[in-house]
């Protein structure tokens, strides 16, 4: 399998993910956005558009090739890409989180811009920072157009192959979405711009999410403060990281809050940081407490739904996911043998939340991990309006769980006929037994055609 087959979704080694991790599912469940957009899973129609774009660009039909390329990027489920002709020029837009990216293809050149902020007086400090950031960009550049700061891409059409466009557009989309909130919060005198497309915050949902964040954080800090930070450094790390990952998936924050969660969790995984685990945990806790000092609006204003064109994570093979599950389950052994049920449960939830945060997976993985998170967080899902028939008064309902698993597997057998979970292997004697057996079975999913 070639590099570009892996990159653009052909073959088993690039499993992909749902075009949008939004639970539309069965009629009983409300529409709810979980996690962040992942673009690794492309439909057959989108892959055909990619092949068409490559062929047309090779024939020097640059504008037609570009239209096909936009068809490859466009996700009908979220309507993230639009285009239309104005005269002979092709105008297009792409949405990425809080930013709208606009461009024109006139047959000779491709010009793209995303405006980040406006100003009345030139912000010298911000300009200096963005100038330095230009050295980190490969295809795009920060620049100023009159009183607007933006990130720009410009190239001749003949030099804009689909492969180059993919990487350039990903760079401009992800950079614009990350930088707009950062610079407007960090530097005075900058005002957000081009945000009319942003969907409003559902105040009721935002309040529920904020309350959940506060409770989870308080519970996590209370738990870690009770542990010996040397002897139990491992479970302290699991607990803290699980807080960041479950917040990212279940609450789906955007903007600066999401960036902070990502930054803080990255402290733990920094390979250049050779400090012992307890010291890293102290750093995580210190940063978490600093985050808690932010005003309530900092959090509630981040809970807005978004559309996106590019994802933050890359595709992971089924074996990678299975191996990680195995490692996590193995790490529960000591806690099981020494009767630490709360610590054991933390690792089970962490297993799902970690995979949902770090990996681009097959759609069936997302659905099964979502089910697992739903069972482990039934109260929040009920508040969101989900029936949650899988657990009642803390007791599992085996038939409902088995029916849901079978329905998920049946949906995905269209693409992978050998998919199966042997539900007879699931154990319902206790919540902990179920979590272990359910995650164990996910390891053995077969994705052969």
Image: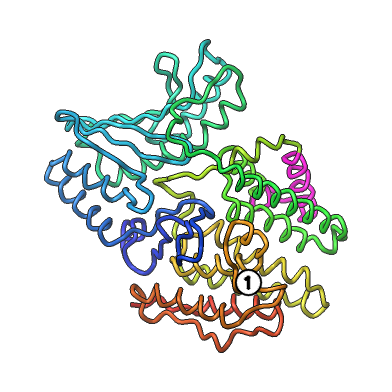
Residue 403: image x %, image y %?
Answer: 51, 80
Q: State the image quarter where residue 65 is shown.
A: top left
Residue 197: image x %, image y %?
Answer: 42, 35
The residue wearing badge 1 is 327
The quarter of the rendered structure image containing the N terminus is bottom left
The quarter of the rendered structure image containing the C terminus is bottom left
Residue 393: image x %, image y %?
Answer: 72, 73
**Residue occupying the point 55% across, 60% down:** 356
Boundaries of the magenta span: 267-292
Describe the element under mark 1 as helix, strand or loop: helix
Q: State the image quarter where residue 401 is shown.
A: bottom right
Please name whichever residue, 406 or 448, is drawn nearer the observer in this view of the structure: 406
**Residue occupying the point 13% across, 41% down:** 60
Q: How many marks?
A: 1
| Residue 284 lies in the magenta stretch | yes
Residue 115: image x %, image y %?
Answer: 43, 26
Residue 272 visible in the displayed image: no
């Amino acid at each position: 399998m070639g590099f570009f087959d892996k990159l653009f979704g052909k073959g088993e080694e690039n499993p992909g993910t749902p075009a949008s991790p939004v639970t539309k599912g069965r009629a009983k469940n409300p529409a709810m956005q979980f996690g962040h957009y992942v673009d690794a899973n492309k439909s057959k129609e989108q892959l055909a558009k990619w092949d068409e774009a490559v062929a047309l660009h090779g024939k020097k039909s640059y504008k037609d090739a570009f239209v096909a390329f936009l068809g490859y990027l466009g996700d009908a489920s979220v309507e993230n890409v639009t285009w239309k002709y104005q005269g002979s020029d092709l105008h297009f837009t792409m949405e990425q989180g809080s930013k709208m990216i606009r461009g024109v293809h006139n047959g000779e050149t491709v010009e793209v811009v995303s405006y980040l902020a406006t100003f009345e007086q030139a912000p010298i400090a911000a300009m200096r920072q963005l100038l330095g950031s230009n050295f980190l960009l490969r295809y795009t550049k920060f620049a100023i157009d009159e009183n607007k700061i933006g990130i720009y891409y410009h190239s001749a059409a003949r030099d804009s192959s689909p492969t180059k466009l993919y990487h350039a557009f990903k760079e401009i989309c992800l950079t614009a979405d990350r930088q707009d909130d950062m610079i407007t919060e960090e530097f005075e005198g900058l005002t957000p711009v081009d945000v009319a497309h942003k969907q409003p915050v559902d105040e009721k949902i935002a309040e529920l999410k904020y309350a959940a964040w506060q409770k989870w954080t308080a519970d996590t800090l209370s738990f870690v403060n009770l542990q010996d930070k040397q002897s139990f450094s491992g479970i302290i790390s699991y607990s803290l990281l699980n807080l960041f990952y479950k917040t990212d998936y279940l609450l789906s924050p955007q903007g600066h809050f999401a960036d902070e969660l990502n930054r803080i969790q990255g402290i733990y995984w920094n390979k250049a940081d050779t400090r012992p685990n307890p010291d890293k945990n102290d750093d995580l806790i210190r940063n978490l407490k600093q985050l808690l000092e932010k005003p309530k609006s900092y959090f509630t204003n981040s809970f807005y739904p978004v559309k996106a064109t590019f994802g933050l994570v890359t595709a992971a093979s089924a074996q990678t996911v299975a191996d990680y599950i195995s490692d996590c389950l193995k790490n529960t052994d000591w806690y099981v043998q020494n009767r630490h049920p709360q610590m054991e449960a933390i690792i089970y939830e962490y297993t799902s939340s970690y995979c949902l945060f770090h990996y681009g997976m097959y759609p069936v993985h997302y659905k099964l991990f979502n089910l697992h998170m739903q069972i482990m967080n039934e109260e929040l899902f009920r508040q969101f309006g989900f029936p949650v028939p899988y657990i009642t008064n803390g007791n599992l309902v085996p038939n409902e769980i088995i029916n849901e698993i079978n329905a998920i597997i049946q949906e995905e057998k269209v693409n992978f006929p050998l998919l199966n979970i042997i539900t007879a292997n699931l154990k319902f004697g206790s919540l902990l037994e179920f979590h272990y057996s359910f995650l164990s079975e996910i390891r053995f999913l077969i994705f052969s055609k």
